[in-house]
Amino acid sequence: MQAVTYPIAERISSISVSSTMKVSADADKLRAQGEDVVDFGAGEPDFPTPDNIKQAAIRALEQNFTKYTAAGGTAELKKAICERHAQDFGTSYTPAECIVTVGGKHVIFNLTQALVNPGDEVVIPVPYWVTYKDVVNYAGGKCVFVDTEESNGFAVTAAMIEPHLNSRTRIVLINSPSNPSGAVVDREEFEKIYRMTAERGIYLMTDECYCKFLYDSEPYSIASLPGSKDTVLVAGSLSKTYAMTGWRIGFGLVPAPIVTAMTKLQSHSTSNPTSISQKAAVEALRGPQDSVTAMLAEYRKRRDFVIQRLRSIPGVTCAEPRGAFYAYPNLGVVIGKNGIHNTTQLAERLLSEQKVAVVPGEAFGTNSHVRISYATSMHELERGLDRLHQFVVKNS
Ligand SMILES: Cc1ncc(COP(=O)(O)O)c(C=O)c1O
């Protein structure tokens, strides 16, 4: 009998494999072969989930809280999300304007599915988090990229965005602090971007995944601006804030009709986020917040160390990250040398020759940078940066 092969659906061909996940897989493969790999690829805290959160999950299990919940999350968790956002940022969301999702990625995916029609444009500053491009493509939308300057710390401004807006623009997507650059949009500039989009009836999506990890300013949400709830779409996640990447809890704070649309989609795809994780998330949001402060203090020490070390490598420049836990150095000095033609080849060579895993800048829309995650121990940072230094000296 002849084997039947079916073609893969076209919508899947419009997206690519997440490069950050590919780097982790390549590093894992080498490690499994017994190699001593330093992994700067992982975009997740190296801290364990705080104990009070884990205990809440254990209690949930003991109390048999192990069944389906409402597809868009429990009433208890929605309330806890609204209350935490109100306490942190002075916003006034109600549970009807809240949806709980299977991580922050899921809220961005469902939002674009709910709002983007084929041909609609989504404006995205570069460098951008890998997933934005693919979820917009998957919805049939068109990404419109806005370049920023390394010399300005990759900061995006309203003036940079404005020429890219037109009658097809549906969403402007801001991620502050940014993955991969650590760039931050200051409050005044954010308000300008908000006014510019609101006046034109364009949604402003704010990805607040790293909102608590800021080094020189206070946490801020554009959704705190009076009247902004109609056009601001908050995409949130507990993954990084509470070191809960594996628990898969994210949330959206968006107008109620959009919650209804997203819940409909969720009810036919994932159904509810894991019941046990939802109980743990309530504790994360309502319990002590000191673990967040402790992680930030540690990230700050590491950032200062990483930046100083990167800048000491001949020919390497690096904008200072103002938030999140990534550095985005420019390694253009080795491109065009010794058979290295782009950052993908650079990352491959760095992994095979020096056993250091980084994410190539092409994944984020630039072509001479790599992303280094400093959510790893000082010891690993020292070892990996020594190796990177040797690699650059050898190849430039
Ligand atoms: C900018 C940004 N947004 C959202 C997410 C989503 O995180 P998760 O789906 O793990 O909650 C990530 C994860 O890396 C991210 O970097």
Image (spheres, rainbow, N blue to C red):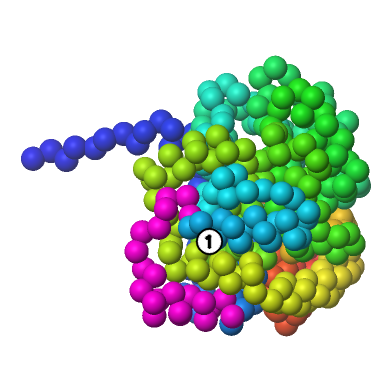
Q: Which residues are magenta?
A: 52-73
Q: Is residue 339 magenta?
A: no
Q: Looking at the image, can residue 62 be seen?
A: yes
Depth order, front residue of 238/52: 52
Label 1, on which residue?
A: 76
Quarter-of-image position of residue 193: top right
Quarter-of-image position of residue 316: bottom right
In x, y percent, where is residue 95? 58, 50
Q: Is residue 13 above or below residue 165?
A: below
Report if the beta carbon of the residue with label 1 is closer than 8 angstroms to ligand 1.
no
In x, y percent, where is residue 199? 79, 24
Q: Looking at the image, can residue 105 be seen?
A: no
Residue at 65% x, 55% y is 82
Q: Quadrant of the N terminus?
A: top left
Decide if residue 353 is on the left or right side of residue 383: left
Q: Is residue 183 above or below residue 120?
A: below
The residue positioned farthest toward the left in the image shown = 1
At mark 1, the secondary structure is: helix
In x, y percent, where is residue 13? 45, 35
Q: Is residue 328 above or below residue 269?
A: below
Q: Is residue 170 above or below residue 13?
A: above
Residue at 56% x, 66% y is 281
Residue at 76% x, 22% y is 200
Q: Callout 1: 10 Å neighbours few (<14), some, many (20+)?
A: few
Q: Is residue 70 magenta?
A: yes
Depth order, front residue of 127/297: 297
Residue at 56% x, 45% y is 96
